[in-house]
Structures are given as structure tokens and as C-alpha cells.
Amino acid sequence: MFFKNYLVFEISMSQYRFLRNTILKALFIFLVLNILFTKLYNYPYGKISLYNILFEGRDRLPFGENPNKSYNLTLNNLDAMFSSLKINKAQKNDDEFRILLIGDSSVWGIRLDNQNTISGQINEHSFTTCDGKKIKVYNMGYPTLSLFKDMMIINRSLSYSPDLILWFVTLESFPMVNQLSSPIVTNNPTEVQLLVNKYKLKNYYLSDITLPDFYSKTIIGQRRNIHDLIRLQLYGAMWASTKIDQDLPQTFSPALRDFEEDDSFHDWRPPLLPKDELAFDILEKMSKSLDLPIILINEPILISHGENSHIRYNYYYPRWAYDQYRGYLQNFVNKNGLKYYDLWNLVNEKEFTNSAIHMTPKGVAKLCSNMIEIINETICLKK
């Protein structure tokens, strides 16, 4: 009996030691992997993509709040975002004239299928240049209002050899307080530092940026980004088979047309919009640094005729602030010799959906007819 109990005890201790050693080895391996991963933090692993290999590339940058219905998601890895795009498939052909559209959610196309976006509607015409090159317009817009975010996307897009950039702007993307608020800016501090140094911007843009510490570079610290990168690849199959990249419910809350008696814009009140607190320096540095033509477009906004519309054009803009902004922007482009078109009042208020900048397909068509004229004035088009 004693021998039997002793044998059971020995077996139990043996099992305990085996389990303990296995756990310790696993923890050691996991620790080593985390340390090694920190050395790979700056490695562009997001460029490892199934898009344009197993799945067709996407028509616009990944963005989505309902992945199970949109087969899309919002993530922070810029390499993964750009690697998923159709434009990333191959080098530009000699017979292609490449136009990039830069801007906010109105360019990306909230509540619009890809074919109804600005890029989709222009590409439908299959234009060529007068010297025979095929016009191809790429949607590089991304939701959130920030010129710094736009600059980040432009800088990344230069590797695709664009021939022309159409940069859509609006007042809400100018306040300095908005520049670092976009999640893809906030979550890419190393990229922010690179851009500030490259384009010699104010140190202000580094004020709220925290560079990653050791923990942030580990597998544990990067688990959300790794998870999102894998999910983006998995959604590629559904995107390729359905071409759905946005959930479009039939009902939505329309943009406000009636307002309270409020004439504020951010924390500013009339009569003066402080120009030194608007990010015109980003426009100036970019326009002077790039060796290709940029056309600035002041994008259409909803102009309400509802209650207190004599005070505000829309939810975003009181009239006094927006009118001053248009004057500032016109003076800026005149001073810097930039090509600029002010299309702010082009689209009827009925052709806006859930925001003062999001348009219906009909509203986009109205804008596109003007954009085609603008492009034709710049490079000469023919069908």
C-alpha cells in the first residue's frame, strides 16, 4: 500500500514538473519572440498582402464601422492600407495618365458605391489625353477632416508616380486643433515625425505625439494592429466576390438644415477668424515641395435654407467664418501661384445626405461634370 501511494506521488510530481517546465519554456519563448518583434517594429510587414494576388485590389482605402456587413474595417497600419489598393498592383504603364484624388469622406464616398464616387464617375467616361494616354483616376480620399492626414496620404501616394493631384479641402480640415485628431495620424507617430522633418513643418505638430515605447513595439502592444491586418486579408475574399466595401442602410439621419442661434466656429466667435490657427503652412510646404501639379478644390458644402440659415450655412460653418476662410484661401493661392477652383456652392442642398459634405450620386455627378472641365483645362481630354 505504501509503495502504491509513493508511486502515485512520484507520478504526480513528475507530471507537475513536466507541466511547470512546459509553461516556463513557453513563457521564455513568448518573451524572446516579443523582444525579437520589437526589432522588427519598423519592418513594413503590412506590405505582405493577399490583395492583387489572391484577391482583387480595393478601389479605396480601407475604412468601415460594420465589418460583417461592409467586408471592410478601419485600421492604423498604413502599409496594409495602401497594399490593399488596386493602384498597388503594378507599376504605372507608359500609356497611363494617373490622377489622384485627395480629401475627406466626401472624396472617399460615404453612402456611395464605388461607381458613384468622384473617381468612379469620372472613370466611367474612359477619357484619354489628347496625346493618347488613358486617364485613370484613383480615389485616395479618407474619412476625417485634417490637412495633415491628407499630407500623410499624398506623401505615401508619391510612390505610385501620379501625374496630377486634385486636393479637395474644406474649412473644417484647416484648424490646427484638428490636424492630429485623425486616428491614422495619432496612431502613426513615427510617420508624423518623418513628415514634420521632411517638409520642415512647425514643431507644433509634434506637441501631442508620443513615440512608441518598448511595450508598444511588442507583440502584446501590437496585438490590435496584427489582428486588424489579418482581418483585412480575410475580408478580401468577400470584397472580391461581392465588391461591397461599405454598409449602406436604406434609412439614415439627414444632415441638419435647421439650427439654433449659434454663430460659433470651434471656440471662435465673430468678427475675426484667426488665420494663424489654420494650417495653411501644410498647403504651402506641400505645394512647394512636390514636383508635380496640384489643383486645390474648395469642395461643395450644403447651404441650408432652414431655420437660422442666415447665421449658419450648415452644421459645420457659421457664415462669417466660412466667408473669411474663402477669402483667406483665395489670397493664399494667388500669393503662391496655385491652380484653384472654388466649388463651394455648386451642389443643391437637396443633394446632400447625412452630412454637410456627403453628396448623393446626383450631387457627385454635378461635381464631376465640373471636374472634367477642370481636368480638360489642365491636360486636354478626349473620348
Image (cartoon, rainbow, N blue to C red):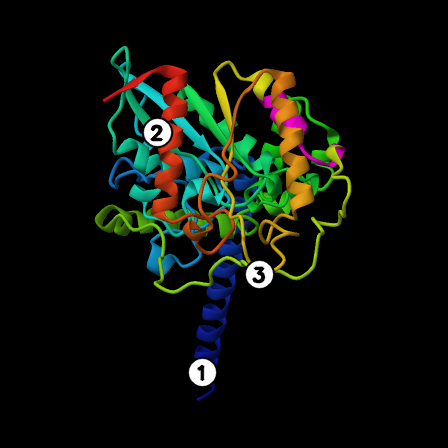
Q: Quadrant of the C terminus?
A: top left
Residue occupying image coordinates x 71% and y 52%? 263
Q: Point out the frontmost of discs 3 and 2.
A: 3
Alpha-carbon span between mark 3 and mark 2: 36 Å
Tell me if residue 229 comes above or below residue 46 in the rendering: below
> How would you rate the neighbour count of disc 2 (Cα within 10 Å): few for under 14, some for 14-19, many for 20 or more?
many
Residue segment shown in magenta: 276-286
Residue at image mark 2: 137
Residue occupying image coordinates x 68% and y 26%? 201
**Label 3 amino acid?**
Asp
Element type where label 1 sits in the image? helix
| Residue 179 seen | no
User: Which numbered disc, 3 or 1, marks the residue that appears first in the sequence?
Assistant: 1
Residues at discs 3 and 1 in contact (Cβ within 8 Å): no
Residue occupying image coordinates x 28% and y 48%? 239
Residues at discs 3 and 2 in contact (Cβ within 8 Å): no
Residue at image mark 1: 3
Q: Point out the frontmost of discs 2 and 1.
A: 2
Residue at image mark 3: 258
Of the pair 265 and 207, the residue shown nearer to us: 265
Alpha-carbon span between mark 3 and mark 1: 89 Å
